[in-house]
Image (cartoon, helix red, strand yellow):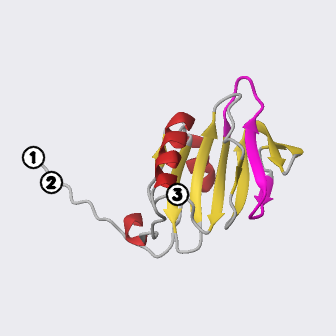
């Protein structure tokens, strides 16, 4: 039997082919990296699915759409989005992202500044995300443990 040694390389920051990570992701939400001031998350919205209307009072959010078609609503204003589009949602803006396709997922990644979800969060479905967020908001705020990125 041959033994294989696996080396784990720790680096400062994060490196990945973000287009590949985004397009291959089938989870509603998957946190890829959490830093002190920024968090990188990939998302996949099923046909007709949305993230739900929400407002982040203390963070800005950047969205990049890799595939599919959708609609962004910010404070009641609607904008159509498609692959290669970018949207920035300033703190305090009521917003929603909606997959307007009947057949294809909407694949995107988002940057939260500062981080918004616990390190390593994976929500396979929107229902799981809603349940987890309700439980998280019932608890007191937690410090981001950057060691969990390793």
Q: Earlier in the sequence, mark 3 or mark 2?
A: 2
Q: Which residues are magenta?
A: 86-106
Element marked by disc 3 = loop
CA gap, disc 3 to disc 2? 38 Å
Please, which residue is most extreme toward the left here?
1
Alpha-carbon span between mark 1 and mark 2:
7 Å
Q: 1 above or below 32? A: above
- Crowding at label 2, few (<14), some or many (≥20) Cα neighbours within 10 Å? few
| Callout in the foreground (3, 1) | 3
Q: Which mark is residue 146?
A: none
Is residue 122 shown left or right of residue 42? left
Q: Residue at x 61, y 40 (%)?
A: 44
> Residue 6's quadrant in the figure?
bottom left
Quarter assignment of residue 82: top right
Query: Which of the labelled discs sits on residue 117, or is there none?
Result: 3
State the SS at label 2: loop
Q: Which residue is mark 2?
A: 3
Q: Which residue is mark 1?
A: 1
Q: Nearer the viewer, residue 24 or 123?
A: 123
């Amino acid at each position: 039997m041959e033994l294989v040694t696996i080396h784990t390389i720790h680096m400062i920051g994060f490196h990945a082919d973000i287009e590949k990570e985004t397009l291959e992701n089938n989870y509603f939400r998957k946190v890829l990296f959490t830093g002190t001031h920024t968090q990188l998350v990939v998302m996949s919205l099923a046909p007709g699915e949305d993230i739900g209307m929400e407002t982040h009072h203390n963070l800005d959010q950047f969205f990049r759409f890799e595939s599919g078609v959708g609609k962004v609503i910010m404070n009641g204003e609607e904008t159509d989005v498609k692959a290669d589009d970018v949207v920035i949602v300033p703190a305090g803006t009521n917003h929603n992202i909606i997959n307007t396709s009947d057949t294809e997922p909407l694949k995107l990644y988002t940057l939260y500044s500062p981080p918004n979800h616990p390190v390593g969060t994976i929500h396979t479905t929107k229902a799981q995300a809603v349940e987890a967020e309700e439980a998280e908001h019932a608890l007191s705020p937690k410090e981001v443990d950057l060691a969990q990125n390793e």
